Amino acid sequence: MNKLVLKLLLVLAVLFFVIWKLSSSVKFQLFGELIYQVDTEQKLVALTFDDGPTPHYTAGVLQLLDLYQVKATFFVTGADTQRYMTQAKQIVAAGHQLGNHSWSHQRMVFMSLDEINRELEGTDQQIRTAGFEGEILFRPPYGKKLVLLPWYLANTHRTSITWDVAPETFDEDSEDPQTMATEVLEQVKPGSIVLLHLMYKNREASRAALPLIIKGLKEKGYRMVTLSELLAAQ
């Protein structure tokens, strides 16, 4: 293999690494506004839940939040919201916030603008049908974005929301609710955005960690609010 080929392979490897890091960053995107935490001195935290809603777990999550009198933000998919509109309406009726997590929950790194439009606008429509009237914030599936998605977000004046605290490992065999709660309580600070997944059968550890997280945050003097309320505290 000659030196020119080696140099080309090296350049391609570096380019791939840069693209991968850029697409995976929760703190940076090429266009538009991205928020992963809020700069505030108030002891406020936003609990955010991705995916769903689902008929099996939404009610239990809402009951828990009501028990502890805290508000949260649910980043829902358009497909699940359409399928389980009753649960979506229950989230809104309970005073929580709905956010856009795309229609199909596919990685949107290489989607065309037409595909991005369908994914976001269709989900917005379902969120409005559920009765949510506030600003619809967006969270990219898997946190992935590159060029066209941020460009679309910027041109449609959408705020992209990621997170600064994410205790899940997505390894069911190693996840422990108490460990997850401890990780959140050690990392949290005023203005933090916490990410959890609660809506599917394999997220039992996350659901068990939620009351531990809420109780721990309350003991540390934090108040849990919707993302819009957190953004207003900047």
Image (cartoon, grey):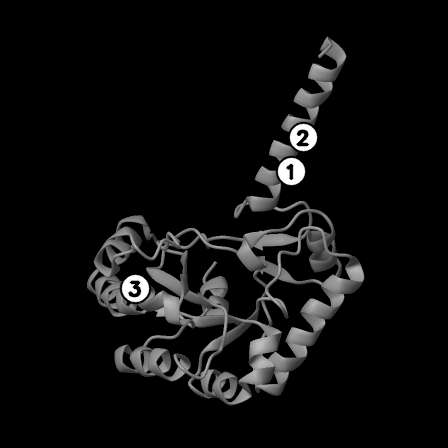
Q: CA distance from mark 1 to mark 3?
A: 33 Å
Horizontal side, residue 9 vs residue 112: left or right: left
Q: State yes or no: discs 1 and 3 in contact (Cβ < 8 Å).
A: no
Q: Residue furthest left?
A: 219
The residue shown at (32%, 83%) is 63
Q: Which mark is residue 205?
A: 3
The residue shown at (51%, 90%) is 86
Q: Nearer the viewer, residue 138 or 228?
A: 138
Horizontal side, residue 52 vs residue 15: left or right: left
Q: Which residue is mark 2?
A: 15
Secondary structure type for disc 3: helix
The residue shown at (40%, 56%) is 191
- Dot 1, crowdedness within 10 Å: few (<14), some or many (≥20)? some
Disc 2 marks a residue whose amino acid type is Leu
Residue 164 in picture, x, y percent from top left: 43, 51
Q: State yes or no: discs 2 and 1 in contact (Cβ < 8 Å).
A: yes
Q: Residue furthest top?
A: 3
| 208 to 89, vertically: above or below | above
Q: Residue furthest right?
A: 114
Disc 3 marks a residue whose amino acid type is Ala
The residue shown at (37%, 62%) is 45
Secondary structure type for disc 2: helix
